[in-house]
Image (tube, rainbow, N blue to C red):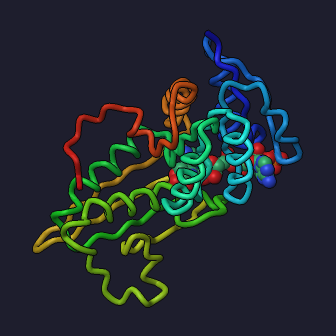
């Protein structure tokens, strides 16, 4: 069966990549390509929508798709667990709403890095995240860093918050789930994240670098193919993969 995909953000870097993948695949078909001037009605009739726009536009696109019963894969950043919880709450009262898959990072390496950091988080009371992205990125901290910090916070639920000394000073980063996150925006970088965990006499650094947007290809295809059969709210590519890791919490 062919899956008809509507791409919101079609003129952007991620949208163009997704359209190339859709056009090269046998089981996906481009139903609509939307940019900032398009009517969201163009999504109607699609089997799945992909949102790769900007944080300011994403909520309206998600609300439209869920209201129209169209499963939607959200790659756009800026979705905290609080905002996702609001969507999940709305979905519980609307049986006919389309599922929403929030995928903060489509790269398997990034998802594994986040999972490894969550696994290690209980054993280190000092944890900080440093993320670096291209200079054109409009939001900070990155969606990946927010997700990583939230999962680390969850993993530490029984052992308490990390030590974040002098966190009131601006140069100490933004606290997400109590974890300082430092954002660099640099020419020459695509996307990187380091989680630095400090313990007595040692540090552990979990580092991931995206050097080409081809890192996102398998994750985009997996999410688009899984979305039509999904239910409710799904968060993270890890939810679609069997990582085989022990529970971090
Ligand atoms: N989950 C993941 O793995 C990844 C996520 N991202 C995220 O994906 C998003 C897109 O990134 P990227 O492709 O680099 O961004 P670009 O700036 O290259 O593209 C943005 C796209 O959004 C569209 N757009 C802008 N404003 C609106 C609006 N108000 N309504 C509808 N569409 C709009 C633009 O259309 P127009 O041309 O008309 O302005 C354009 O097509 C970002 O949030 C980024 O953080 C990025 C990489 C990986
Ligand atoms: O804007 C980007 O480029 C990216 N955005 C996502 C994020 O905010 O984490 C995913 C990836 O890091 C690239």
User: In the image, 182: left or right of 163?
Assistant: right
User: In the image, 74: left or right of 239?
Assistant: right
Name the foreground residue: 133 vs 81: 81
Answer above or below: position of 77 versus 225: below
Residue pictured at 82% horizontal, 41% vertical: 40
Q: Quadrant of the N terminus?
A: top right
Residue pictured at 45% horizontal, 71% vertical: 182
Q: Is residue 179 visible?
A: yes
Q: Is residue 189 visible?
A: no
Residue 92 pos. (x, y %): 54, 47
Residue 141 pos. (x, y %): 52, 66
User: In the image, 57: left or right of 131?
Assistant: right
Residue pictured at 23% horizontal, 61% vertical: 121
Q: Quadrant of the C terminus?
A: bottom left
Q: In which quadrant of the rendered view does residue 206 lie?
A: bottom left
Residue 124 pos. (x, y %): 19, 68
């Amino acid at each position: 069966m062919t899956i008809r995909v509507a791409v919101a953000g079609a003129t952007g870097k991620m949208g163009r990549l997704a359209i190339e993948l859709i056009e090269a695949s046998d089981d996906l078909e481009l139903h609509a390509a939307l940019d900032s001037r398009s009517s969201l009605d163009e999504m109607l009739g699609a089997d799945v929508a992909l949102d790769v726009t900007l944080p300011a536009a994403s909520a309206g696109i998600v609300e439209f798709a869920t209201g129209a019963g169209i499963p939607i894969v959200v790659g756009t950043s800026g979705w905290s667990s609080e905002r996702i919880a609001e969507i999940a709450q709305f979905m519980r009262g609307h049986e006919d709403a389309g599922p929403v898959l929030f995928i903060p990072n489509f790269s398997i390496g990034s998802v594994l890095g986040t999972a490894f950091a969550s696994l290690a988080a209980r054993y280190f009371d000092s944890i900080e995240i440093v993320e670096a992205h291209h200079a054109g990125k409009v939001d900070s901290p990155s969606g990946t860093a927010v997700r990583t910090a939230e999962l680390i916070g969850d993993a530490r639920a029984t052992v308490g918050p990390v030590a974040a000394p002098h966190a009131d000073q601006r140069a100490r980063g933004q606290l997400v789930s109590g974890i300082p996150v430092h954002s660099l925006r640099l020419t020459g970088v695509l996307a990187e994240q380091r989680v630095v965990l400090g313990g007595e006499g040692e540090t552990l650094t979990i580092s991931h670098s995206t050097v080409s947007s081809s890192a996102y290809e398998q994750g985009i295809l997996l999410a688009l193919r899984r979305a039509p059969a999904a239910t409710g709210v799904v968060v993270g590519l890890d939810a679609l993969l069997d990582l085989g890791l022990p529970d971090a919490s």
